[in-house]
Amino acid sequence: MPNKKNKKIDSEKACECLIEDLIEENIEKNEDRLCELSENDFEVYIDPDVEKISYEFYMKKMTDGLPIIPPTKDRVLKFFEYSDRKPDDVIATIPPRWGKATIEKIAINSVMAGCIPAFMPVVQDSIQAISQDKFNLPAINATTHPVSICTIINGPISRELVINNSTGCLGPGNIANATIGRAIRLCLINIGGAIPGIGDHATMGSPSKYSFCFGEAEYESPWDPLHVERGFSKDTSTVTVMAVDSPHNVNDHRSTCAEDLLDTIVHTASVAGCNNSHVPGEMLVIMGPEHAQLVAGDGWNKTDVKEYIHENTFVPVEMGDRGGRKIESKWIDSDGNVHITRKPEDVVLVVVGGPGRHTMIAHGFGTSSDSVTIPITLKDGTPVDSIRDFKNKKL
């Protein structure tokens, strides 16, 4: 059996072994015993009745409807090891109930979501990010619009935690993507009171409200990644939160030049009925690596792409004006159209995904919310190089 303590990890190309290391905490197993920590190989510890506890939490409206991991004391304590804050430190207050999001409460909801302890800094900083005024969480939680919270992770920690940025990264199959996004949602429900039909008034809701979290494929992108574009160094790990609809696919296998491909994206995004059609704002463009390489190969930089999408994505005012808020005259151009975005910078462009000529677009919440990007740091503001910088940090 290999000695995992001597295994070196390439932070740029992390493999699944890293998740195994994080779960097992690098305990070197003794092959002569089933468990080196137990004196009796046949000793059995009875866990709480998971089904009963999960159902009780559900009946108290404390879950998203899926089974949970019981937040026992021992499980929660493991999450404290990955935070340099005290359990009763308040990270944010979450509407509509304005509950205090303490480290302890965030850890409890992370356990319930199925996170492993090493995910704690990402969840903790995501909660801090969504609490910023410009994100406008009170409106996001209270609206009838099916807006969800998208979390994008950049930098070394994204690779260290093996956050999926490739094939199927917006779907099932990756523990980090699935549980980090879910932990954020459970914090909104249990700390903020954003319970469907009570604090969360989305008419139909959205499958993205279960979990919407992924990493950017930085080494597949021909352009600067999102966090670098927003002023952070390549080696700084960041969390970006954005209020968006569920993503819609853009299928283009035929275009052979940048402009044709971008026209397909523009046409897909130019729809009445989205919030952006009557209150222009940010829009997320999740471009597959093959599409990105085609566009960049034609000599287009990231600024060119954002400007083209902004200038050409619009709807006629008579269609856009059917939304929930009357269109202000400043958003209507001389041709009687309303642009989906206010400016090129509103086009949030990331390169994500595996093989295949696909892009996805997700309209935002209009002028009501702006995305937030913050670095993952220690309490004193020092950026971290690794998730292990939090491990056993003195409070």
Image (cartoon, rainbow, N blue to C red):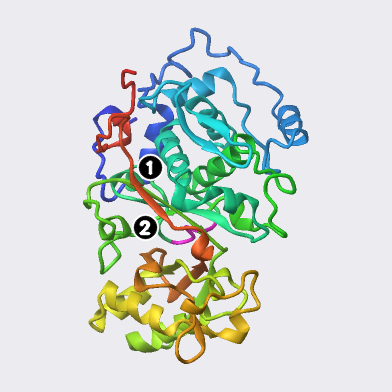
- Return the residue nearer the eye: 187 or 336: 336
Residue 135 higher or lower than 316, as above or below: above
Horizontal side, residue 73 vs residue 22: left or right: right
Q: Residue 328 at what x, y percent from top left? A: 53, 75
Residue at (24% x, 44% y) in the render: 10
Tag 2 secondary structure: loop
User: Residue 161 — which label?
Assistant: 1
Residue at (27% x, 37% y) in the render: 384
Query: Main structural element of the magenta stretch: helix, strand or loop?
Result: loop
Residue at (64% x, 56% y) in the render: 143
- Return the residue nearer the eye: 336 or 166: 336
Q: Residue furthest top?
A: 39
Q: Residue 219 at what x, y percent from top left? A: 27, 60
Looking at the rendered structure, the kind of residue marked 1 is Leu
Going from N to C along the chain, the mark reached first, 1 or 2, is 1
Horizontal side, residue 198 vs residue 315: left or right: right
- Return the residue nearer the eye: 300 or 87: 87
Q: Which quarter shows the C terminus?
A: top left
**Residue 6 occupies which quadrant of the picture?**
top left
Question: Magenta residues?
Answer: 167-171
Mark 1 touching mark 2, by CB under 8 A? no
Tag 1 secondary structure: loop
Q: Residue 151 at what x, y percent from top left? A: 46, 51
Q: Mark 2 — residue?
A: 216
Residue at (43% x, 56% y) in the render: 371
Q: Residue 160 at what x, y percent from top left? A: 33, 43
Res 2 seen here: no
How packed mark 1 is, by other alpha carbons closer than 10 Å (few <14, some 14-19, many 20 or more), is many
Q: Which quarter shows the N terminus?
A: top left
Res 57 seen here: yes
How packed mark 2 is, by other alpha carbons closer than 10 Å (few <14, some 14-19, many 20 or more), is many
Is 324 in the magenta?
Answer: no
